[in-house]
Image (spheres, helix red, strand yellow):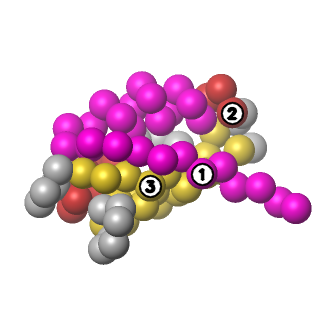
Amino acid sequence: MVQAYILIQTEVGKAADVAAEISGIPGVTLAEDVTGPYDVIVRAEARNVDELGKLVVAQIQAVEGITRTLTCPIVHI
């Protein structure tokens, strides 16, 4: 299982709508709107890195109002 945090920038005023829509996507375990340089932080999981990439590109980035994403895979050192 691969887990990651996805940091999202949105159009002005769209953070709550984006977080709400993303929270319903399978594989997303948490989606919250926040303040700071990013507007939404998402925690997601997938079976492998390829599945995680598909989740981010095909489903999360397709949400209306997103302008940029940064995916941060979780590592256990």
How far apart, in angstroms, are the residues tagged by discs 3 and 2?
Answer: 17 Å
Is 66 displayed left or right of 26 in the figure?
left
12 falls in the magenta region: no
How far apart, in angstroms, are the residues tagged by discs 2 and 1?
Answer: 11 Å
Q: Which residue is mark 2?
A: 49
Kindly identify the residue that appears in the image at 27 percent across and 42 percent down.
Answer: 67
Residue 38 at x, y = what percent? 35, 62
Kindly identify the residue that appears in the image at 72 percent across and 33 percent down.
Answer: 48
Residue 45 at x, y = what percent? 61, 46
Q: Nearer the viewer, residue 29 or 4?
A: 4
- Quarter of the figure that contains the N terminus: top right
Q: Local crowd at mark 3 within 10 Å, few (<14), some, or many (≥20)?
A: some
Q: Secondary structure at mark 1?
A: strand
Residue 61 at x, y = what percent? 36, 35
Q: Which residue is mark 1?
A: 72
Q: Which residue is mark 3?
A: 7
**Residue type pointed to by label 2:** Val
Q: Which residues are magenta?
A: 52-77
Q: Residue furthest right?
A: 77
Q: Secondary structure at mark 2?
A: helix
